[in-house]
Amino acid sequence: MIVFTTTTSAQTFKIIPRTYGAEFTMSITDDSTNIPVFYEINNAITDVNYLKFTQAFSPVLVEGHFYDIRLYTDYNFWNINYLLWENDNSLWNVDRPTDATIYRDRIFCTDQQVDQMEDEYYDINLDKYKTFNSFDNTYKVF
């Protein structure tokens, strides 16, 4: 799972995809509204075994929401799929709405500091629920 914030600036993806390429389409679907938003990515670079790119989200991600992310290439677009065609040219004359999914994951949006290696976990009640730590069990009766 990827953890992002509600910032308006670009956020960095660092993923291990099924296939590597510099150009693809990213679809992000909010689980609450089930509305997908599409982004054309053309700035991805390969960093050792990772595919790395940045993207600013518009509309901005909502605090506490889950998102489904899918990266895919379109079989009907020749420049992106030349490498796929070299591996399997049976799709050369196919003209139908198909795509090749290269990555799937989930995004969780929060502005809290989350680092499980440092025992910092997400708290759904952060700053909303206050406990009263009193060890005195007395009360006044008037």
Image (cartoon, grey):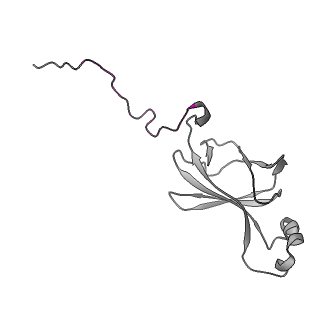
Q: Which residues are magenta?
A: 119-136
- Magenta-colored stretch includes residue 126: yes
Q: Residue at x 53, y 36 (%)?
A: 121
Q: Quadrant of residue 37?
A: bottom right
- 25 above or below 64? below
Image quarter of the C terminus? top left
| Residue 17 coordinates in the image, percent (x, y) | 75, 56
The answer to whether 42 is drawn above or below residue 127 in the figure is below
Q: Position of residue 46 (x, y in %)?
A: 84, 49
Which SS does the magenta portion mostly show? Answer: loop
- The part of the image, by quadrant, that contains residue 7 is top right
| 92, above or below 34, in the image | below
Q: Is residue 45 visible?
A: yes
Residue 76: in magenta span:
no
Left or right side of 110 for 39:
right
Q: Is 126 or 20 nearer to us in this picture?
A: 20
Q: Is residue 121 left or right of residue 93?
A: left
User: Where is residue 44 drawn, in percent x and y?
Assistant: 81, 51
Q: Residue visible at 65% across and 43% down?
A: 8
Left or right: residue 118 versus residue 142 is right
Which of the pair 23/49 is nearer the observer? 49
Does the rendering let one see residue 115? Answer: no
Q: Position of residue 99 (x, y in %)?
A: 73, 70
Residue at 84% of width from left, 82% of height from top?
A: 93
Using the image as rendered, state which of residue 94 and residue 138 is in the foreground: 138
